[in-house]
Image: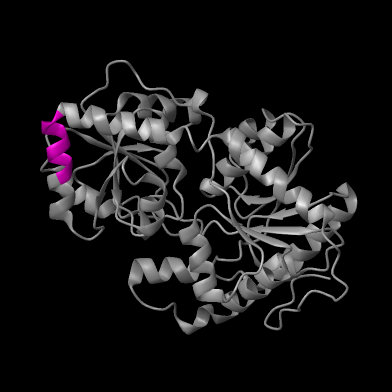
Amino acid sequence: MTADAVGGVWDYALELARGLALRGIRVTLAVMGPAPSPTQRAQATSVQGLDLRHGDFKLEWMEGAESDMAPAGDWLLDLADHVKPDVIHLNGYAHAALPWNKPVLVVGHSCVLSWWRAVHDAEAPTNWRPYADRVSAGLVAAGAVVAPTQAMLDALETHYGPIVNGKVIWNGRNSANWQARVEKEPSIISVGRIWDEAKNIRVLDGVAAELDWPVEVAGSWRSPNGGSTEDAPTANLRRLGQLGPEELADRYGRASIFALPARYEPFGLSILEAAMSGCALVLGDLPSLRELWTGAAVFVPPDEPATLSRELRRLIAEPDRLRGLATAARQRARGYGTERMVARYLDVYADLVDAPRPVTPHREIAAVPLGR
């Protein structure tokens, strides 16, 4: 299984690997991009039998990734030759077109073209065309394609063409790790990659001064591409930095409201964690989030600060409604548990292993060689 240590894919991969381990399935986690932090390595060590490997290669969506595609592909193929897996599970796209001798699953957590459309309301610049070609070829080569929401699966088809064997499997979290306090504090929390424009933290900062409750934000301000928004002015937010799992769970458990006026969010593990922790949800009005949380969240247009401010102030002023929304979110979150996610992936793996092997080679990617 491939992964990265940049964002939610890391948490998703460990959650899935832990569930698979309980069923006697061994996972080799091939992490590319920035190396896992000491905290992340400790998390990985807690997963029984997990074989963690790191390859110092840029992720396919990073600037300058083209030169790393071929050596990363060789590294993955060599690793597969060594561990001899039954299934190749790629949390990325391009390397599905490598000459694997085992069935390949691609999971589409996000992509540059749909991100660009959501954040900039325009098509991605032409310099992203080689990336798009590699993604398209990987989707064609995969034995199956999974997305965490129908909205994300639809986005892949919109930008890269028809997907023959596409499935939706919701991401999951273990609710035992996320608990609400009996007495919530009068506070609002937001969690995510703060450097990512899609999270829209600037809008939240803009309205925080109008609220009677403090707004706390946890997450990284440093982009894996090397840039940082750490020095950018956010006068009205309490910056918590990047928190470890236990401290983050404590912060969720204390907060009354989780706010994320996102412009783009194919699933949102932080939203699920907050819901499991008894937070009322105020979210960007996106098809993916409506798919998951309709009836259990307040939705606001991402670029309407006045609406965001009004809805947050309304929840603060109406404690009964606040509690009702928190209860609804927590009940909805029960449907997004680890057990269900693992069972669905086991079904997909079984279908892949039983499927007839292709008799023709995978389609090549002309723009950049991916490996041997």
Per the picture, the main secondary structure of the magenta-coloured stretch is: helix
Residue 299: x and y, percent?
Answer: 26, 50
Residue 256: x and y, percent?
Answer: 26, 29
Q: Is residue 153 left or right of residue 56?
A: left
Residue 161: x and y, percent?
Answer: 57, 76
Quarter residue 324 falls in: top left
How many discs appear? 0
Q: Which one is in front, 37 or 61?
A: 61
x 22%, y 48%: residue: 205
Q: Which one is in front, 142 or 110?
A: 142
Q: Which one is in front, 92 or 224?
A: 92
Residue 43: x and y, percent?
Answer: 61, 32
Q: Is residue 111 visible?
A: no
For the record, the magenta segment spans 311-318
Quarter residue 181 falls in: top left
x 37%, y 45%: residue: 293
Q: Is residue 187 left or right of residue 156?
A: left
Q: Is residue 64 above or below residue 232?
A: below
Residue 184: in magenta span: no
Q: Is residue 265 visible?
A: yes
x 41%, y 70%: residue: 116
| Colour scheme shown | one colour
Quarter residue 247 falls in: top left
x 84%, y 54%: residue: 354
